[in-house]
């Protein structure tokens, strides 16, 4: 009966694999009964003679098995595949360079087999180790292990030593949660084992590295760093981001921003301006803004249709209402994920398509707003209105805040144009361009996930952009949506009796609203509160004779009207669709994690 299975992960080991197998067999035979162990060569997509040599060895010795893979699985992937095929109750793996002294193999195996530990691992960093390691490898290793202890709460000193043993039941209970398939696999298994309360033995080993290594100390170290941050987020951050905590954090940010603004804004004057505003144009502004929502639903329907899914206009309008309400309630635009949940649960649209359709919508939004802002800016420059000379009445602190918002808006505009240019470029060229670019940085499973997401995003955008009719429908509806958004602001400005000519009112209004919407794209505050008002106020004051208190009051009312319509529609839609915002956010977080598996 096979009690112990030793896996040797092999990638291009033609020069050493035969000696490694012989040494491993001899060492196992020195302390285990005959027939109680096996050695598995987990050959991982090699492009040298390793597969032929491993097959020959396995054919001549019943104690040896060869597990072949045509594709590169990564070290973690190759180990998992071999462990699932192994027969032993004690599962062991050794790096094929035998850098760890084989005189430690008995202690490694027996720690699990007879002493009752769930996991045993050799360590090059505990007292008693003997290591001849060059500084160029020792320093990054110590830094990584220190980061693993700090960020992941690990109690171990050395996570990456390729000399480990596992109880079969314990390891298999962990494998479904382990997501890395390359070098970080060792660390993730050890950290998850500690979090499960498993008994782990870490003991010192003698270790002398070979001259060559298959680790790329730029690409793979960066990849391991990204996985380290991913686990830190999963273990330490994500459990604390509950719907209640998200709402509380968002409310705190808004309250803090409001408190800080009282230091340099005379709210008494602003409130007086708001109180004097004509309520009729404001009510009309709310009605105009409400008209934009069926257009949002129609645009989203056109996007989903091109991606192969169809749904009624009323349902999709409600889904947009719910998601935008979520963006007001939760920080970091978590409401976008709510829409993916709604169309998945109610209409069977897969999460990848739901997220991709949102990305397509965002590209059209950004591009439309950028075009509007750029067109109006050109017109203002042509008539000499683009020189902001009326800023003397704006408090210095708020002027700085407004300029920050303008900088964010400019960056978002450039990003929108760049994103569209990259999509067009990828449509004309190689769709694998993104994957190759990501692979230059990292080759771990997270990098593959990123590459897949980029390719899917580019493909879905191209699916819409590649159909002239669909592109025209989405572009036209985007233009209509944002024109109504501007019209809402213009009606609010008119309610404040700003005394501007219709031409100047329309021109400045288009520019201020467009830039304000670009400024709030980044999820720096819930609903873009503060950023929108800052950009809007700075531009209106700078380009017209309108005073600061009036412009700021109009910005507040404009944003409040839009948010009020959004929340009212969102609450009604939530009840109509029978969905919970909190449940939707939690479900989509789990879905995003599953997508990476």
Image (spheres, rainbow, N blue to C red):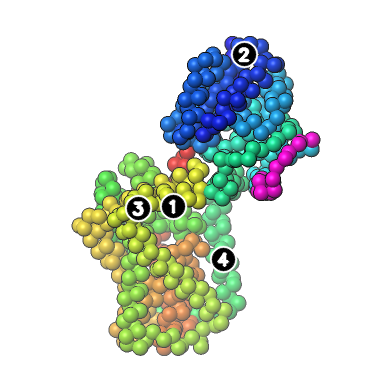
- Of labels 1 and 3, earlier in sequence is 1
Q: Which residues are magenta?
A: 128-141
Disc nearest the viewer among 3 and 4: 3
**Residue 449 to residue 165: above or below:** below
Q: Which mark is residue 36?
A: 2
Q: CA distance from mark 4 to mark 2?
A: 68 Å
Spot occupied by residue 102 in the image (x, y as percentages of width and height)? 69, 26
Distance Cα–Cα, label 3 vs label 4: 39 Å
**Disc nearest the viewer among 1 and 3:** 1
**Residue highlighted by disc 3:** 458
The Cα atoms of the two marked residues, 2 and 1, are separated by 47 Å
Number of other residues with Cα within 10 Å of mark 1, as a class: few under 14, some 14 to 19, many 20 or more: few
| Nearer-N-terminus badge (2/1) | 2
Query: Mark 4 or mark 2: which comes first in sequence?
Result: 2
Q: Which residue is mark 1?
A: 437
Q: Residue at x 57, y 42 (%)?
A: 215
Sort mark 4 into few (<14), some (14-19) or many (20+) by Cα contacts within 10 Å. Answer: few
Label 3 SS: helix
- Mark 4 touches mark 2? (CB < 8 Å): no
Secondary structure under tag 4 reads helix
Q: Residue shown at 41%/86% (left/top)?
A: 387
Q: Earlier in the sequence, mark 1 or mark 4?
A: 4
Which is nearer the eye, 368 or 398?
Answer: 368
From the viewer's perspective, is the residue at label 1 or at label 4 nearer?
1
Local crowd at mark 3 within 10 Å, few (<14), some, or many (≥20)? many
Residue occupied by mark 4: 255
């Amino acid at each position: 009966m096979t009690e112990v299975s030793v896996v040797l992960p092999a990638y291009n080991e033609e020069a050493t694999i035969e000696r490694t197998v012989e040494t491993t067999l001899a060492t196992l035979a020195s302390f285990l009964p005959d027939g109680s162990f096996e050695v598995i060569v987990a050959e991982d997509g090699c492009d040298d003679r390793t597969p032929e040599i491993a097959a020959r060895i396995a054919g001549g010795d019943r104690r040896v098995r060869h597990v072949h893979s045509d594709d590169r699985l990564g070290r973690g992937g190759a180990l998992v595949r071999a462990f699932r095929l192994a027969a032993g109750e004690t599962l062991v793996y050794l790096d094929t360079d035998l850098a760890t002294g084989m005189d430690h193999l008995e202690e490694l195996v027996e720690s699990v087999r007879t002493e009752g530990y769930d996991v045993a691992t050799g360590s090059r960093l505990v007292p008693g180790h003997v290591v001849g390691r060059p500084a160029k490898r020792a320093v990054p290793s110590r830094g990584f292990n220190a980061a693993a202890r700090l960020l992941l709460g690990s109690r171990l000193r050395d996570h990456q030593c390729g000399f480990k043993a596992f109880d079969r039941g314990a390891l298999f209970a962990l494998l479904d949660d382990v997501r890395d398939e390359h070098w970080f696999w060792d660390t993730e298994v050890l950290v998850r084992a500690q979090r499960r309360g498993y008994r782990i033995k870490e003991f010192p080993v003698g270790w002398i590295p070979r001259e060559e290594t298959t680790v790329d100390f730029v690409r793979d170290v960066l990849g391991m760093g990204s996985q380290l941050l991913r686990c830190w987020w999963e273990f330490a951050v994500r459990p604390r981001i509950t719907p209640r905590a998200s709402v509380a954090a968002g409310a705190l940010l808004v309250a803090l921003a409001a408190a800080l603004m009282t230091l340099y804004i005379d709210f008494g004057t602003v409130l007086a301006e708001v109180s004097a505003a004509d309520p009729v144009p404001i009510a009309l502004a709310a009605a105009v803004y409400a008209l934009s929502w069926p257009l949002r639903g129609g645009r989203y329907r056109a996007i989903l249709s091109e991606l192969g899914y169809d749904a009624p206009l009323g349902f999709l309008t409600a889904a947009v209402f719910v998601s935008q309400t979520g963006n007001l309630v939760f920080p970091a635009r978590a409401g976008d994920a709510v829409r993916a949940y709604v169309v998945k649960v109610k209409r069977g649209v897969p999460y990848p398509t739901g997220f991709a359709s949102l990305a397509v919508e965002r590209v059209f939004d950004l591009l439309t707003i950028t075009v509007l802002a750029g067109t109006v800016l050109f017109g203002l420059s042509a008539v000499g209105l683009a020189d902001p000379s009326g800023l003397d009445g704006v408090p210095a602190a708020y002027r700085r805040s407004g300029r920050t918002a303008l900088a964010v808006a400019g960056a978002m505009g450039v990003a929108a144009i760049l994103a569209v240019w990259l999509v067009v470029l990828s449509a004309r060229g190689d769709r694998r361009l993104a994957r190759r670019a990501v692979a230059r940085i990292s080759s771990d499973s997270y990098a593959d996930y990123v590459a897949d997401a980029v390719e899917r995003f580019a493909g879905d955008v191209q699916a819409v952009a590649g159909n002239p009719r669909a592109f025209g429908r989405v572009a036209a509806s985007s233009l209509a949506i944002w024109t109504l958004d501007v019209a809402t602001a213009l009606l609010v400005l008119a309610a404040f009796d700003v005394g501007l000519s219709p031409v100047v009112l329309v021109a400045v209004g288009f520019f201020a609203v467009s830039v304000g919407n670009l400024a709030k794209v980044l999820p720096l505050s819930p609903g873009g509160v503060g950023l929108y008002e800052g950009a809007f106020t700075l531009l209106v004051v700078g380009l017209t004779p309108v005073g600061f208190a009036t412009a700021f009051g109009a910005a507040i009312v404009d944003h409040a009207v839009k948010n009020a319509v959004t929340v009212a529609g969102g609450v009604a839609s939530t009840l109509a669709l029978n969905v919970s915002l909190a449940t939707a956010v939690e479900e989509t977080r789990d879905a995003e994690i599953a997508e990476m598996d």
